[in-house]
């Protein structure tokens, strides 16, 4: 698969690759600098040990390192490279590595070439395109950020074999979200295939990563800087972000999105936008992903959730804004979500595991 994405910065490319040979070729070029997830480096040492030590930064993929300090440390190392503006940044890892290296790639010398190898399913099916990068600052998650896509994204499926069940299911949370947004036919397909993808059937997964990226591509090409229709991709994220915050990030992003979908759809059912039957089918698929996490009731205290929602940078004013499914094929942004609706939806999320 080869896909091109048009962006204001450049046209960039996503490839599905069946070997990591290109990493060796990049390592042979003197102007490349590598930022690699430390766990990936240890797991794939047979390929990655050829990376020259003086052009390598190993990053611990923890939220507490997704900071400007880490970005500056990498910048400092890059200034030692003789190639300067021709320095080619290569990063290998999940969303944390992507966020840090995206920030570096856009900032240093006002932008340098960047190649990214996503190693988590979440990064491969969603975050690798769209160009967003964000860093945490003090207690604020994703406060600092820019838009700057990689030049090339190489997706190598065998990386997903070593993901924990939880991180693998987290990636599938975004896949399910894309297929729910895309309408009933697309949801029918993922509902039928979910057990196969959960069992790491990569022939089937391949199709879903590809269609997820194609689906996202239409939104980001039309609205790269998130001023219009791209907001619809934020479906399930108002609540998802709140659950990430209330669990202190014990719930990984994509699983929080799965919970956010159940919450948003319950509000759609309360409003008569969606049949209880269809919402329940979506919920059943989400719950297959949520089996990989123990849900702790204290993460769902109403006041904590409401507080987290009101602090979200995407909220405007005092009311609650969220994207809801209005009918099976249409999504709409609502600014009038009531706290009582959220309360009922959280209750539903906790008590009814279908
Ligand atoms: N920029 C965006 O558009 C965007 C979108 C969504 C999420 N994010 C950010 O992405 C981050 C989450 O990223 P993520 O879910 O991709 O995971 P991650 O980068 O947090 O990695 C999760 C864990 O998996 C490990 N890991 C990574 N690849 C592995 C592999 N192939 N085998 C074994 N272990 C592996 C990592 O070391 C880490 O322990 C969050 O910080 C979130 O804010 C960014
Ligand atoms: Zn997301």
Image: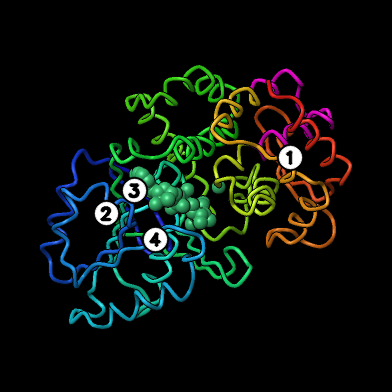
Task: Using the numbered discs, state the Cα–Cα distance from disc 4 to disc 3 in whole angstroms.
Answer: 31 Å
Task: Using the numbered discs, state the Cα–Cα distance from disc 1 to disc 4 in whole angstroms.
Answer: 30 Å
Does 6 sit left or right of 266 as displayed? left
- The mark that comes first in sequence, 1 or 4, is 4
Res 60 label: 4
Residue at point 55% right, 46% down?
252
Res 297 label: 1
Can you tell which of label 4 and label 3 is closer to the viewer?
Answer: 4
In the figure, 113 relative to 125: above or below?
Answer: below
On the image, the x and y values in percent for residue 174 come to 53, 39
Res. 308 image quadrant: bottom right
Q: Can residue 128 be seen in this view?
A: no
Does 211 sit left or right of 113 as displayed? right
Q: What element carries label 1?
A: helix
Provide the residue designation for mark 3.
4
On the image, the x and y values in percent for residue 36 come to 30, 59
Residues rendered magenta in the picture: 259-281
Q: Quadrant of the N terminus?
A: top left
Q: Is mark 4 within 8 Å of ligand 1?
A: yes
Res 41 label: 2
Look at the magenta stretch and give its main secondary structure. Answer: helix
């Amino acid at each position: 698969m080869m896909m091109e994405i048009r962006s204001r910065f450049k046209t960039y490319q996503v490839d599905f690759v069946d070997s990591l040979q290109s990493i060796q070729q990049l390592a042979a070029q003197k102007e490349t600098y590598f930022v690699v997830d430390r766990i990936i480096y240890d797991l794939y040492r047979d390929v990655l040990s050829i990376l020259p030590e003086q052009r390598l930064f190993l990053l611990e993929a923890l939220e507490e390192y997704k900071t400007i300090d880490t970005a500056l440390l990498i910048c400092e190392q890059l200034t030692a490279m003789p190639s300067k503006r021709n320095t080619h940044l290569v990063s290998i890892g999940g969303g944390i590595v992507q966020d840090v290296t995206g920030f570096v790639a856009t900032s240093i010398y006002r932008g340098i070439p960047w190649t990214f190898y996503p190693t988590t399913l979440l990064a491969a099916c969603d975050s690798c395109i769209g160009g967003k990068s964000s860093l945490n600052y003090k207690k604020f998650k994703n406060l600092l950020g820019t838009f700057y896509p990689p030049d090339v994204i190489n997706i190598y499926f065998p990386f997903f074999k070593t993901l924990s069940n939880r991180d693998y299911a987290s990636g599938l949370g975004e896949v399910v979200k894309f297929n729910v947004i895309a309408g009933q036919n697309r949801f029918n397909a993922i509902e039928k295939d979910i057990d196969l993808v959960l069992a790491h059937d990569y022939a089937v997964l391949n199709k879903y990563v590809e269609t997820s990226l194609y689906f996202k591509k239409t939104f980001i090409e039309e609205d790269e800087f998130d001023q219009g229709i791209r907001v619809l991709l934020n479906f399930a994220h108002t609540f998802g972000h709140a659950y990430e915050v209330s669990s202190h990030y014990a719930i990984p992003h994509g699983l929080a999105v799965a919970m956010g979908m159940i919450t948003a759809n319950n509000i759609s059912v309360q409003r008569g936008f969606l049949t209880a039957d269809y919402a329940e089918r979506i919920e059943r698929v989400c719950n297959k992903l949520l089996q990989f996490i123990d849900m702790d009731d204290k993460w769902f205290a109403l006041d904590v959730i409401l507080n987290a929602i009101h602090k979200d940078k995407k909220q405007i004013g005092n009311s609650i804004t969220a994207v809801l499914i209005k009918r099976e094929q249409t999504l709409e942004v609502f600014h009038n979500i009531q706290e009582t609706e959220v309360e009922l939806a959280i209750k539903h999320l906790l008590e009814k595991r279908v």
